[in-house]
Image (cartoon, rainbow, N blue to C red):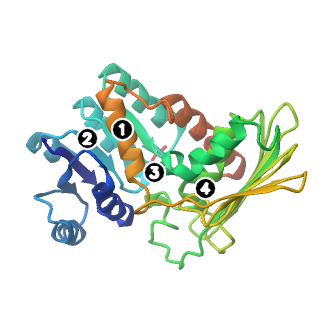
């Protein structure tokens, strides 16, 4: 069997998890053949750790030198658009970490480019492809807890303060909303769709990025989601879905491999699910990509281009209300 050849743009922590998880894919052999980095030290350290053949310091050089089946973009999100655009113009399938780009205008330009070049593009919201998330979606579709009344979800991380880190530096897309808040927004979007009204509040820090952000996403039938992101506290990483018949609790860490999913019905009965799989779970989104490429699809049915565009539009509206800006990139 021929190896499926990948390159990675951005040798950070999530790229390491991605590389490790490729080993858990069944039926196919995947190989990282090249890494594209910004700093020589980190790029070569990544190459040495994973025995990768080639190192580049620009996407242009990667395209000129390598024959690839797909590229995974794992750089800070302000750099997603340009790298993604260049790869799509070269007709190379792309998996790009969330958020797909910094704003709706950029996301639309990437979607248009993918369609124009007849090439696959998917945003890397890996949570969508986890068995645990699929279970929650199935529970909702099967009417286990009835019509949804509300959703409460948070994503927080107590980040050590460093004005030059990717968490707090606006030049690296710092702030809680785009890095963490996208997860609860995504949960609400998958289960309820695009909201009809948004009310948001953010606490901006010294570098003018949001240290914390909260929003109410409401819908015409009275359903709403309460979402929160923060870089200044560590709260339980759980999500709760309240329905007419009962409650679904996705226990910590709800965006990854939760301890369990608990269904508590108002008739007094309950159901427990304990998700189990090897690795972090990034290989599930790779399996989806391979299926799409085999079927000659330009997008995933589970995470289509329209979802990426509408999610970034929700984030754009939250940013507009809370004055979260990235003037160097917009």
Identify the residue position indicated by label 2 in the image: 70
Relative image position of residue 250 (x, y in whole percent): 67, 58
Eye-nearest disc, 2 or 3 = 2
| Mark 1, other Cα within 10 Å: few <14 / some 14–19 / many ≥20 | many
Q: Which mark is residue 328?
A: 3
Q: Residue at x 69, y 35 (%)?
A: 141
Left or right of residue 133: residue 46: left
Q: Is residue 198 above or below residue 295?
A: below
Eye-nearest disc, 2 or 1 = 1
| Mark 2, other Cα within 10 Å: few <14 / some 14–19 / many ≥20 | many
Residue at the right extreme of this rendering: 267
Q: Which mark is residue 177?
A: 4
Q: Earlier in the sequence, mark 2 or mark 3?
A: 2
Find numbered disc 2 in the image and state the secondary structure of the residue it sits on. strand
Q: Residue at x 80, y 44 (%)?
A: 145
Q: In this orientation, does residue 155 appear?
A: yes
Left or right of residue 255: residue 193: right
CB atoms of marks 2 and 1 within 8 Å: yes
Identify the residue position indicated by label 1 in the image: 289
Q: Earlier in the sequence, mark 2 or mark 1?
A: 2
| Mark 3, other Cα within 10 Å: few <14 / some 14–19 / many ≥20 | few
Q: Earlier in the sequence, mark 2 or mark 4?
A: 2
Q: Earlier in the sequence, mark 4 or mark 3?
A: 4
Eye-nearest disc, 4 or 3 = 4
Relative image position of residue 14 (x, y in whole percent): 39, 62
Nearer to the camera, 124 or 266 = 266
Q: Is residue 52 above or below residue 197?
A: below
Which image quarter holds the N terminus? Answer: top left
């Amino acid at each position: 069997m021929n190896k499926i050849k990948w390159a990675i743009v951005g040798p950070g922590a999530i790229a390491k998890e991605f590389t490790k998880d490729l080993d858990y894919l069944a039926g196919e052999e995947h190989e990282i053949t090249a890494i594209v980095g910004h700093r020589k030290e980190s790029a070569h350290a990544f190459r040495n750790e994973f025995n990768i053949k080639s190192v580049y310091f620009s996407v242009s050089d990667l395209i000129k030198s390598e024959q690839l089946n797909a590229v995974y973009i794992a750089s800070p999100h302000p750099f997603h658009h340009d790298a993604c655009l260049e790869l799509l113009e070269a007709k190379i399938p792309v998996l790009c970490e969330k958020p797909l780009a910094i704003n709706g205008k950029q996301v639309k330009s990437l979607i248009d480019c993918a369609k124009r070049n007849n090439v696959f593009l998917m945003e890397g919201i890996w949570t969508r492809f986890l068995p645990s998330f699929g279970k929650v979606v199935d529970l909702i579709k099967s009417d286990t807890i009835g019509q949804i009344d509300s959703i409460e979800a948070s994503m927080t991380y107590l980040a050590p303060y460093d004005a030059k880190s990717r968490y707090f530096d606006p030049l690296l897309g710092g702030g809680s909303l785009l890095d963490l808040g996208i997860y609860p927004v995504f949960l609400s979007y998958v289960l309820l769709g695009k909201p009809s009204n948004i009310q948001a509040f953010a606490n901006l820090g010294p570098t003018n990025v949001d240290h914390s952000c909260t929003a109410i996403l409401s819908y015409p039938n009275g359903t709403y989601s309460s979402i929160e992101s923060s870089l200044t506290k560590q709260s339980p990483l759980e999500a709760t879905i309240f329905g007419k018949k009962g409650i679904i609790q996705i226990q910590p860490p709800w965006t990854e491999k939760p301890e369990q999913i608990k269904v508590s019905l108002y008739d007094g009965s309950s159901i427990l699910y304990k998700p189990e799989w090897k690795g972090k779970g990034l290989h599930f989104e790779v399996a989806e990509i391979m299926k799409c490429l085999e079927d000659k699809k330009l997008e995933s049915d589970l995470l289509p281009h329209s979802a990426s565009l509408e999610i970034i539009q929700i984030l754009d509206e939250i940013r507009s209300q809370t004055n979260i800006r990235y003037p160097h990139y917009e």
